[in-house]
Image (tube, helix red, strand yellow):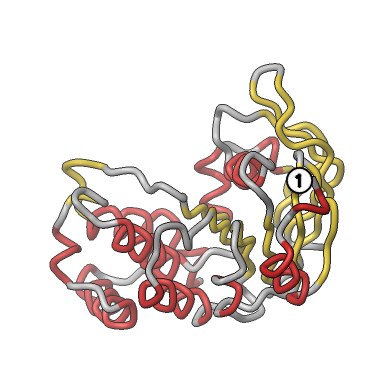
């Protein structure tokens, strides 16, 4: 059974159809990239999978053997589905550290299958991850994303990703607004998780992120449909020729 199986998925907002019959399978350990121009439905697809209430899914969608349409957003997260936002929200009054520990406690048994870490053990683990991402430990005491630069917000989301260790990460234009150094740090964070227990769908406009996070499959999405699929060479072709032939 595939980790994620999508068959003829349509996603609507009110009466408007945004995703128009997408079929896709993601196996354990695979990285899939979805590329396409603005307005092609890429972000709507991953937000619908994560359980955004504005989107309604029609069709067959199963994740880890369960019908995803029957699961609320918080249940999907506990099952191991993670969404990294293109524009992460600020949450005033909730420190990054408190947020991370609360999220970890909510799903620690799925992540580790072992006894939950104590606050002190959690702090030690966080310290190691912060060093990997070259983040100042002072960020842990600041309100979640408040006053963070664009790159810092993206690093904070990769920090969440590494703490929660989801089965499937949905990365919605994580490379947006990043300089080359921040892009490499974010990519390194994703790559350290690669293995049989981690899969990802990477949504992006450009091929530059895929130079660092090498995908197993690349899908081109235009007008709410996947119009072509292939290997990493498809992303390289798009970088040279653009989306003109699909539009």
Residue 139 placement: quadrant: bottom left
Quadrant location, the N terminus: bottom right
Q: Nearer the viewer, residue 91 or 112?
A: 91
Q: Nearer the viewer, residue 40 or 193?
A: 40
Instruction: Indicate left or right for 144 with 112 as reference.
Output: left
Residue at 62% in and 30% down: 55
- Taking the view exactly as shown, the residue that stands out farthest to the top is 15
Image: 176 above or below 162? above
Kind of element beneath mark 1 = strand
Q: Position of residue 187 (x, y in %)?
A: 48, 75
Quadrant location, the C terminus: top right
Q: Position of residue 11 (x, y in %)?
A: 72, 33
Image: 116 above or below 244? below
Image: 114 above or below 146? below
Residue 96 placement: quadrant: bottom left
> Badge 1: few (under 14), some or many (20 or more) residues near its Cα, within 10 Å?
many
Residue at 80% in and 62% down: 2
Instruction: Indicate left or right for 75 with 89 as reference.
Output: right
Instruction: Indicate left or right for 219 with 173 as reference.
Output: right
Residue 158 placement: quadrant: bottom left
Report the residue marked by disc 1.
Answer: 222
Q: Position of residue 178 (x, y in %)?
A: 39, 64
Residue at 38% in and 48% down: 88
Instruction: Indicate left or right for 117 with 213 as reference.
Output: left
Q: Position of residue 209 (x, y in %)?
A: 55, 71
Q: Nearer the viewer, residue 206 or 81?
A: 206
Residue at 72% in and 65% down: 238
């Amino acid at each position: 059974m595939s980790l994620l199986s999508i068959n003829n998925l349509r996603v609507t907002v009110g009466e408007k159809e945004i995703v128009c019959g997408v079929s896709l399978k993601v196996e354990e350990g695979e990285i899939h990239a979805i590329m396409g121009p603005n307005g092609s439905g890429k972000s709507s697809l991953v937000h619908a999978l994560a359980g955004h209430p504005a989107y309604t899914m029609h069709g067959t969608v199963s994740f880890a053997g369960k019908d995803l349409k029957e699961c609320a957003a918080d249940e999907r997260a506990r099952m191991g589905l993670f969404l990294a936002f293109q524009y992460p929200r600020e949450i005033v009054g909730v420190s990054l550290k408190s947020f991370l520990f609360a999220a970890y406690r909510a799903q620690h048994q799925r992540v580790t299958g072992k006894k939950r870490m104590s606050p002190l053990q959690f702090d030690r683990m966080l310290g190691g991850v912060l060093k990997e991402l070259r983040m100042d430990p002072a960020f842990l005491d600041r309100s979640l994303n408040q006053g963070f630069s664009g790159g810092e917000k993206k690093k904070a989301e990769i920090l969440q990703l590494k703490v929660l260790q989801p089965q499937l990460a949905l990365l919605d234009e994580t490379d947006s607004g990043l300089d080359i150094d921040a892009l490499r740090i974010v990519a390194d964070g994703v790559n350290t998780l690669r293995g049989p227990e981690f899969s990802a769908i990477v949504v992006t406009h450009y091929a530059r992120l895929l130079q660092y996070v090498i995908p197993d499959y690349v899908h081109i999405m235009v007008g709410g449909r996947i119009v072509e699929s292939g290997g990493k060479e498809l992303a390289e072709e798009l970088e040279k020729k653009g989306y003109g032939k699909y539009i």
